[in-house]
Image (spheres, helix red, strand yellow):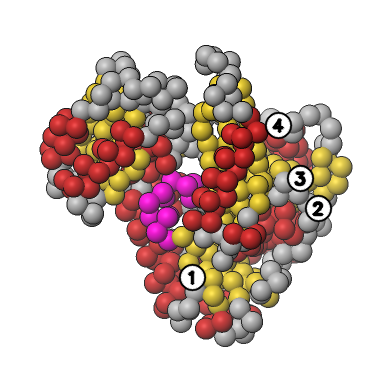
């Protein structure tokens, strides 16, 4: 029997699970996240191995979901230096790179320039590519930076100039410098795609750190036969090498894992998922078993980007959220939280801070810690706190709906005990077994995907032929990422007319996913 190990690192807890070949849960644990992320990972791996009693040599796959990249951008820590080359003069010189970035993020940029080149929306050349200028720029930053970000006008339609620039960069800078190429990362829209590419470049050291750290943690615990995968934010997996090339794709993988895990545990393919953690609650939408992708540009750490992201709303409610009574008699919950200190700060654990978990215990929603410690909380105070939490969650659920109809709601996460099993706007509220570790389960059962996106003129290629070719390319991309070819299926098809383009131009986006080989 072969097993999979799934680990998901959250702000409050690090969850670990082991599942067998039939994707049944063998063991699961929740361990407090530590200041040193990797000690928390090691603690959770040790605990789940002890509980499961499985032979370490029989673990063939290990999956990690981590918030390291998100934290690095938000905190402005551990980012790499980078240089930015945009191919788009003279058409795009009016808007410089990083024009609206915060100064503390801009400080990681050692140089930037815009050179001649780029394309029109239909693939016609805007200007010839200035190879000499590209070479000169790369020579000027040699030895001064860890990473290069390359973007080009309409590279998502035609990436010839980006590929040529990357070849020159490799020739001048060698193989040790990380290259981020916009056509491989973002979607339509030069500035947002360029921003995503720059952030990817800035994350190369962070990616090296968490991939090496996870590998070393496994080895330290005697797990040496496992192929390692990282979670991406579309609900699928990527290899270690892929994660090092595209670390930005791990951003928001936490809520994505929870959504996938919720789908697997509840057997629901379409629902609203409410993932309650220790600090925040993430609300997302399940569509055909995968997270619904956001249709708008997403801001990460103050930077507007357009690469794929799950459509998720986050609110400051969690199991560790601090509850307060205001001077006017109202009760507020959060957004601040005791986080991973809940086991020593919350009343039920002998602490002195009233948390959302204490309220749930007082109202009889769960039995955690010592309930005698919360007996002094007035019932009307507890009910007001509960009403405040429920109201925030119900409003967020309504925001995620595509219509006014009631929908199925799946509650997961370690903090889900703070919410009742009846919510306005829900046809039914499900709390499946193993829901506290849905994120780790989502990480472990994930598939491998490929997404193909391109502008097509149906006057030149008939719609049926264009869609057929796009589907073939998406399947090929999934297989090249590690999916077993006979398991790959098309899970999403977008075919959007673009009225602001001449002719019958549409944006085709196809996603395919399959089981790991």
Quadrant occupied by the C terminus: bottom right
SS under mark 4: helix
- Could you give the CA–CA distance between mark 2 and mark 4, rounded to whole angstroms? 19 Å
Q: Which residue is mark 3?
A: 270
**N-term-proximal mark, 3 vs 1:** 1
Residue positioned 61% across, 28% down in the render:
462
Residue 399, which numbered label?
4
- Could you give the CA–CA distance between mark 2 and mark 3, rounded to whole angstroms? 13 Å
Snapshot quadrant of residue 405: top right
Residue positioned 43% across, 46% down in the render:
248
Residue 252, magenta (yes or no): yes
Quadrant occupied by the N terminus: bottom right
Snapshot quadrant of residue 509: top right
- Could you give the CA–CA distance between mark 3 and mark 1, rounded to whole angstroms? 31 Å
SS under mark 1: strand
Residue 470, magenta (yes or no): no
**What segment carries the magenta color?**
240-258
Residue 207 coordinates in the image, percent (x, y)? 38, 55
Q: Nearer the viewer, residue 403 or 470?
A: 470
**N-term-proximal mark, 1 vs 4:** 1
Q: Residues within 10 Å of mark 2 (few under 14, many from 20)?
A: many
Q: Which residue is mark 1?
A: 227
**N-term-proximal mark, 4 vs 3:** 3
Residue positioned 43% across, 61% down in the render:
240
Q: Is residue 108 visible?
A: no
Residue positioned 22% across, 43% down in the render:
169
């Amino acid at each position: 029997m072969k097993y999979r190990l799934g680990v998901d690192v959250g702000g409050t807890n690090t969850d670990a699970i082991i599942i067998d070949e039939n994707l049944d849960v063998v063991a699961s644990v929740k361990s407090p996240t530590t200041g040193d992320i990797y000690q928390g990972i090691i603690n959770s791996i040790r605990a789940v191995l002890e509980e499961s009693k499985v032979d370490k040599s029989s673990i063939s796959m290990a999956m990690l979901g981590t918030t390291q990249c998100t934290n690095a951008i938000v905190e402005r820590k551990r980012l790499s230096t980078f240089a930015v080359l945009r191919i788009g003069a003279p058409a795009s010189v009016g808007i410089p790179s990083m024009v609206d970035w915060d100064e503390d993020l801009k400080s990681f940029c050692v140089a930037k320039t815009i050179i001649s080149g780029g394309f029109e929306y239909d693939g016609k050349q805007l200007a010839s590519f200035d190879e000499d200028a590209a070479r000169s720029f790369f020579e000027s930053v040699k030895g001064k930076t860890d990473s290069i970000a390359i973007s080009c006008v309409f590279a998502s339609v035609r990436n010839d100039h980006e590929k040529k620039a990357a070849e020159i960069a490799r020739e001048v800078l060698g193989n040790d410098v990380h290259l981020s190429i916009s056509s491989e990362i973002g979607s339509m829209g030069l500035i947002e795609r360029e921003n995503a590419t720059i952030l990817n470049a800035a994350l190369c050291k962070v990616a090296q750190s968490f991939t090496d750290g996870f590998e070393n943690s496994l080895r330290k615990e005697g797990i040496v036969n496992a192929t390692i995968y990282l979670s991406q934010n579309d609900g699928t997996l990527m290899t270690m090498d892929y994660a090092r090339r595209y670390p930005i794709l791990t951003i928001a993988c936490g809520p994505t894992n929870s959504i996938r895990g919720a789908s697997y545990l509840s057997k629901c393919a379409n629902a609203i998922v409410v993932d309650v953690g220790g600090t925040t609650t993430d609300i997302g939408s399940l569509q055909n078993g995968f997270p619904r992708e956001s249709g708008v540009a997403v801001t990460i750490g103050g930077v507007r980007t357009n690469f794929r992201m799950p459509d998720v709303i986050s609110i400051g409610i969690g199991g560790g959220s601090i509850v307060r009574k205001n001077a006017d008699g109202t009760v507020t919950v959060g957004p601040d939280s005791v986080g991973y200190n809940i086991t020593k700060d919350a009343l039920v654990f002998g602490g002195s801070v009233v948390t959302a978990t204490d309220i749930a215990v007082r109202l009889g929603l769960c039995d955690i810690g010592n309930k005698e410690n919360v007996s002094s909380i007035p019932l009307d105070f507890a009910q007001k706190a509960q009403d405040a939490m429920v109201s925030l969650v119900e409003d967020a659920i309504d925001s995620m709906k595509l219509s006014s109809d009631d929908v199925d709601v799946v509650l997961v996460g370690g903090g889900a005990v703070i919410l009742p099993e009846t919510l306005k706007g829900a046809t039914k509220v499900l709390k499946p077994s193993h829901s506290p570790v849905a994120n780790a389960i989502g990480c472990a059962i994930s598939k491998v995907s490929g997404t193909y996106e391109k502008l097509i003129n149906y006057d030149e290629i008939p719609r049926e032929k264009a869609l057929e070719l796009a589907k073939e390319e998406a399947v090929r991309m999934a297989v090249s990422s590690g999916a077993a070819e006979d398991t790959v299926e098309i899970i999403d098809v977008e075919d959007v007319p673009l009225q602001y383009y001449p002719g019958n131009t549409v944006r085709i986006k196809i996603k395919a996913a399959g089981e790991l080989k």
